[in-house]
Image: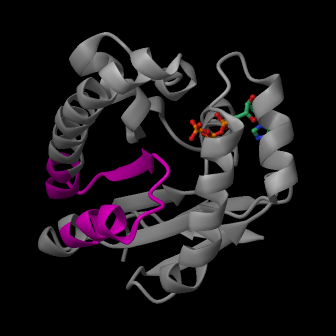
Amino acid sequence: MKITLPYAGIVLLIGPSNSGKSTFIQRLIEENKIHASEVVSSDDFRVLVSDTDFIDWKQRPKDEADNLYDQYQIISREAFSMMDLLIEKRCKLNKLTFVDATHLHADDRKRYIEIARNNHVPIVAVAFDVNQETLLERDDLREKPRGKRRIRQQFQTFKREKRFIKKEGYMASFFISGTNDIEIIRRTNNP
Ligand code: ATP
């Protein structure tokens, strides 16, 4: 499968936890197809604004998780606000930015479609369509599992949202289930 990326704009990764978004990006960096500074991730921004990733907060005992919930919401809001500002600046400078987060909800995706549109750059979607069984198996092997309930919820949301993603106004949308046979083509800025 060929994935053609624009010279500038946004590459929106979409997929549940464990679908392989960060692994895919890491592979592209290792193969020198993209540069690490072209990637922004919500997990990284949570750490940057709060020194914690909150990755396993839902896994904590109920009382602790309830207490962390409000904190998680506040920190996520600040993290996304910083991240979006950076994406916007990069769009203005005609840079390409890969956004690594789940983007399972239409409102989250819409924000990036608007940022791209307001800055006159394209946006493409790369969706990671992986079956639930695989997502759950991978969770068992993770150092910080995201939790089975959360994975199942995310999988159902993704399944529901798939058909909308195709019609949301991306320059192109790619649905991938494995990463081995993918060829990345980057457009140059030559007309
Ligand atoms: P999150 O949204 O939670 O950050 P993600 O979609 O970015 O998840 P990754 O961090 O790339 O997912 O991968 C999650 C786990 O699944 C890791 O342990 C990784 O090694 C494994 N994994 C990812 N892709 C594959 C793959 N193609 N084959 C086997 N294991 C994989």
Q: Residue at x 16, y 42 (%)?
A: 81
Look at the image and say whether residue 109 sits in the magenta stretch: yes
Question: In the picture provided, is 131 more to the left or to the right than 84?
Answer: right
Residue 136, given in percent of the width and then of the height, sits at 80, 42
Location of residue 139 with respect to 7 vertically, above or below: above
Location of residue 31 with respect to 181 vertically, above or below: above
Residue 98, given in percent of the width and then of the height, sits at 43, 49
Question: In the picture provided, is 33 more to the left or to the right than 20?
Answer: left
Q: Nearer the viewer, residue 73 or 79?
A: 73
Quadrant containing ligand 1: top right
Residue 87, given in percent of the width and then of the height, sits at 24, 48
Image color mode: one colour
Residue 24 in view: no
Question: In the picture provided, is 118 more to the left or to the right than 105?
Answer: left
Q: Nearer the viewer, residue 43 or 9?
A: 43
Viewport quadrant of the N terminus: bottom right
How many numbered marks have been drawn onto this rendered protein structure? 0
The magenta region covers 88-114
Residue at the extreme bottom: 167
Q: Nearer the viewer, residue 72 or 122?
A: 72
Q: Residue at x 82, y 24 (%)?
A: 141
Look at the image and say whether residue 41 sits in the magenta stretch: no
Residue 26, given in percent of the width and then of the height, sits at 63, 33
Residue 4 in view: yes
Q: Residue at x 40, y 63 (%)?
A: 7
Location of residue 121 with respect to 35 vertically, above or below: below
Residue at the extreme front: 63
Quarter of the rendering containing residue 76 = top left
